[in-house]
Image (spheres, helix red, strand yellow):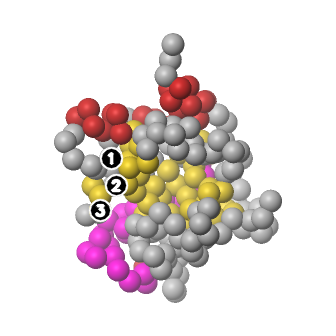
Amino acid sequence: MRPRWIAAVTAVLLSLALPAASGHGGGGPGGPAEQAGHHGHTGQLDRLRDLTAPYAAGPAAPWTIQVVDLAGITCIEDPRGTGAMGIHFVDGANLMDGAIDGAAPEALIYEPQPDGSLTLVGAEHLVLAESWDADHQQVPMLHGQKFSLVEAGNRYGLPAFYELHVWHERANPNGLFDDWNPTVSCPLS
């Protein structure tokens, strides 16, 4: 019998992405280039911005798998009301490779707009804990930040995984790597 997480990951990888919506990124005055608190990571963040610039108006290959939690929610908000993450689109092959690469985030994160378009706000690096822990003694790190562990039994039905958000397109008053961004919102259903 296959473990439940394999079925969940397989379902995510086989799901069809929604058609890409139009929108625009968050450059320009007051945009990501003017965020304070990069702590010496400006070059890495600039490379991430360059990599994701073609996806500012919406997801496209390889980020085509839309994340849906077990309750059917696509736009992820903090249940405690401290902010949101937005809508995640995952690169399935990258998610399953067991590696971390600062120039290849596993997910791009979008904020839905009132007109139905999407605005790129950040990226997320993810790795399944079982894959990472098999070859490493330490928690993954990137940009000088330790990843957070999300235990099994999470809202996505996935096995334990490590994650790190990078708000490279939308300033986050809670910090560049904080999970929840109070400047990101999800529309009311």
Q: In whole angstroms, how far apart are the C-alphas of marks 2 and 3?
A: 6 Å
On the image, the x and y values in percent for residue 186 come to 69, 65
12 versus 36 height, above or below: above
Furthest toward the left, the residue is 137
Q: Nearer the viewer, residue 120 or 163?
A: 163
Label 2, on which residue? 147
Look at discs 2 and 1 and give the one toward the viewer.
2
Give residue 121's position: percent from left, percent from top: 55, 66
Dot 2 and dot 1 residues touching (CB under 8 Å): yes
Q: Is residue 141 left or right of residue 189?
A: left
Q: Residue at x 43, y 64 (%)?
A: 166
| Residue 103 versus residue 184 in the image, above or below | above
In this rendering, the answer to whether 87 lies above or below 63 is: below
Marker count (numbered): 3
- For mark 3, what is the residue? 145
Few, some or many residues within 10 Å of mark 3 (<14, 14–19, 20+): few
Give the Cα distance between marks 2 and 1: 11 Å
